[in-house]
Amino acid sequence: MTALLNALAAEDYERASRYFVGTPDPATLPLDNEGSPATDASEGLAQGADLARKLKLALDSGGMLRPFAVLSNSPDGDLEDGLDPLLEQVGTFQLEGSEQPIILQRVAVEEGELPQWRISPVTVSALEDWSPSPEVAEQSEEKAIEVAGAPVLDWLLLIGVAVALFAALRLLAAAIISVLRRLIPEHSSSAVFRLIHAALPPLALYVATIAFFYVAGTMEASIIARQQLLRGAGIAAWLSLGWFLFRLIDAVARMASERMNRAERRQAASVITLLRRIAKLTLLVMIFIGVLDTFGVDVTTGIAALGIGGLALALGAQKTIENLVGSVTIIGDHPVQVGDAAQIGDTFGTVEDVGMRSTRVRTINRTLVTIPNGFLAGEKIENFSARDQFLFKHVIGVSYDTDAEKMSEVLAAFRTILAENDHVLEEDARARFIGFGESALNIEIFAYFRTASFAESLEMQEDLLLALMRKLKELDVEIAFPTRTLHIDAYGSANGRSAVIPTVRPSQESNKENDGEM
């Protein structure tokens, strides 16, 4: 069909006649003494050229050919169309007020060569009976300005129809969205509105292309221009369908992610993000195959070639596959989720994204670290956001001036503070005198806070430390400072005894210096 249309566009009717059953090939015709085709052969070529010219006029006068996207790419044709396996309908034209099918017939050309599809004798007979109207015959005699084998006016007419259809449907979509925006008070959070808002613009383009198929298919315009624009419309249909599904996937994924985030199911949100990317990648492949099919490429052979090429690619892209497998492992095992604070190897930060190939972590220095998922799946991960409780463990040293009775009083007071604190888990809370330090009597406070939030745990820790400080002041117990006693041997002294000079706290030492005592 492509070769036939190219011959008709070039007005090479003799070449176009070769695609009719029964028309002789000039290369095989007998020649006369002057090297020209014999008279009978010349008449056959002239009749074939006349048939090709009449076919073009019949198609330009309201006839139609099926778009390239609809035609079968198989050499055997469509075997499920209800016709004989050797016949294939590719279009229609008007004959005496009724539609006459354009039938191709699969015929053997020469021994050892593949059969070819040619216009059948049934269609040839119908074309012989067809005669153009006076207006069509007159227009065919006029030489109009042509572009790519079709009159410029026909191109402009068809393009104008396509633009008008798209503009009308796009305005209709905008009007529907505007009405819904007024009818739905909280349209920004409405799932129905967001789906319609995402779907209508690409859907308008898709419906416009489908409408153009039906309108342009039977217009009285050049079949060359119509078929080329219908091929473009087929590509536009695939692209608009892909645009529609892309926006729909994004809208559904966004709503699902928001719902998972509200339920604090961040790992599910990461899974939704990964599934969205896989769906969009699969959709891109399908659209690419659809566009190739519109251009007449045998996609079955292409898919088989992709399978072989995919195997070769897999052998050379082991790291990429390792990262993809790591992504599946991370999503299935979910050691970290988006928003978690985690230590991954030497990197500490907040997980911002779990992708198909890598995971991005925002460090406390606000830098972005990208970690391949293959490495992440085998690395030690410490997830700080997964803590259900926060540890409070502090050692408070009181001065050696505190006697045993006062120490017992301090411990009892500390235990009371822990018991009365609503944020402390009582079963693990304790306050114990744990030993004699170099400069202090050490008391260990051990407890867990009932919270999963790091910020809240800091606030609870601050409140508890202040309460312990107030209690020590109330009991007149000092928090110990590091102190040291220095012994100096006084050689040559009268009694031979050493002098003991105790050190003092820095604040006391500075005061004595100011008083001139040291």
Image (cartoon, rainbow, N blue to C red):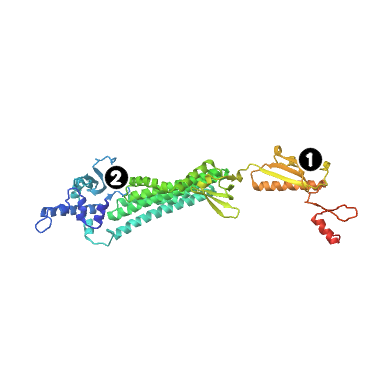
Tell which of 112 and 23 is nearer to you. Answer: 112
Image quarter for residue 229? bottom left
Tag 1: amino acid: Ala
Front of the two marks 2 and 1: 1
Q: Can the viewer see residue 360 in this picture?
A: yes
Tell which of 20 and 463 is nearer to you. Answer: 463
Label 1 neighbour load within 10 Å: few <14, some 14-19, many 20+ = few
Tell which of 234 and 273 is nearer to you. Answer: 273
Q: Residue furthest right?
A: 494
- Dot 2 lies on which element? loop
Query: In the image, 22: left or right of 266?
Result: left
> Where residue 67 sits: x, y (%)?
31, 49
Query: In the image, 33: left or right of 227?
Result: left
Tag 2: amino acid: Ser
Name which of mark 2 and mark 1 comes first in the sequence.
2
Image quarter for residue 12? bottom left
Looking at the picture, does residue 140 appear above or below residue 452?
A: below
| Circle 2/circle 1 CB separation < 8 Å | no
Q: Residue furthest top?
A: 427
Q: CA distance from mark 2 to mark 1?
A: 91 Å
> Where residue 376 sits: x, y (%)?
53, 46
Residue position for label 1: 412
Query: In the image, 59: left or right of 208?
Result: left
> Where residue 186 sits: x, y (%)?
54, 48
Residue position for label 2: 74
- Dot 1 lies on which element? helix
Label 2 neighbour load within 10 Å: few <14, some 14-19, many 20+ = few
Q: Quadrant of the C terminus?
A: bottom right
Q: Residue furthest front?
A: 492
Q: Could you tell me which residue is drawn at 70 percent across and 44 percent down?
A: 393
